[in-house]
Image (spheres, helix red, strand yellow):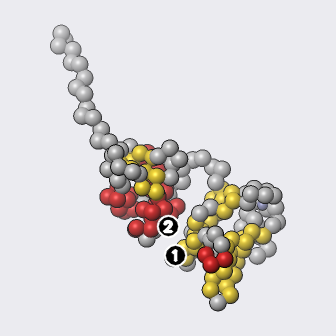
Amino acid sequence: MPEAGDVALVRRGALRSLAIRCPDGCGEVISVNLDPRTGPAWKLYDREDSLTLFPSVWRESGCEAHFILWRNRLIWCDVSDPHSWRSEELKRRIHKLLPAPGLQHAHYADLAMQLDVIPWEALWTCQALVADRVAVPSEKGSRFGLASAPNAPRSSKVDRTA
Ligand SMILES: [Zn+2]
């Protein structure tokens, strides 16, 4: 894996780790543990021939690179814009699962688990529902619930003198 961003799966019997040549070009190899028996582990999703890691990878030393691996693509986490990935089907499925107003909000990773989808896609879908004003986020932006029903539109004053 000579290039920045290249990845290699390490298997010894079971899946052990994912080695990533740091995508920012610093040259270091990041080893991401995939084996929960040996400590905190990331979850690897192998879907349609592409790899996704959850949660994000954050080097706390050295270059401090922070990124997501999603369907073989590296996405930097310092980009504040919500991701543009959209699925109308997933929107409908998540909409049905969101807790009603007043109930405790659901974490996007739990919604993803219930629907057997990639957590990042559940997060981006929740964010899209927020943009549509269907959902509201919790303070930290990782839990979501249904927005209260919008008030009935107020009738605007009609100028009767016309
Ligand atoms: Zn780096």
Residue 47 shows which numbered tag? Answer: 1
- Number of numbered tags placed on the structure image: 2
State if disc 2 and disc 1 touch (CB < 8 Å).
yes
Asked whether residue 128 appears in the rendered view, the answer is: no
Q: Position of residue 34 (x, y in %)?
A: 63, 75
Q: Dividing the image into four quarters, tell me where ligand 1 lies.
A: bottom right
The residue type indicated by label 1 comes to Arg
Which quadrant, please, contains the N terminus? bottom right
Does 150 sit above or below residue 74?
above
The disc, 1 or 2, on the residue closer to the chain's N-terminal end is 1
Asked whether residue 100 appears in the rendered view, the answer is: yes
Q: Position of residue 23 (x, y in %)?
A: 73, 63
Q: Residue furthest bottom?
A: 13
Q: Nearer the viewer, mark 1 or mark 2?
A: 2
Of 109 and 52, which appears nearest the observer?
109
Q: Is residue 131 left or right of residue 33?
A: left
The residues bearing labels 1 and 2 have C-alpha atoms spaced at a distance of 9 Å
- Establish whether ligand 1 lies closer than 8 Å to the Cβ of label 2: no
Q: Position of residue 144 (x, y in %)?
A: 43, 51
Q: How busy is the neighbourhood of tag 2: few (under 14 within 10 Å), some, or many (20 plus)?
A: many
Residue at point 43% right, 71% down?
Answer: 116
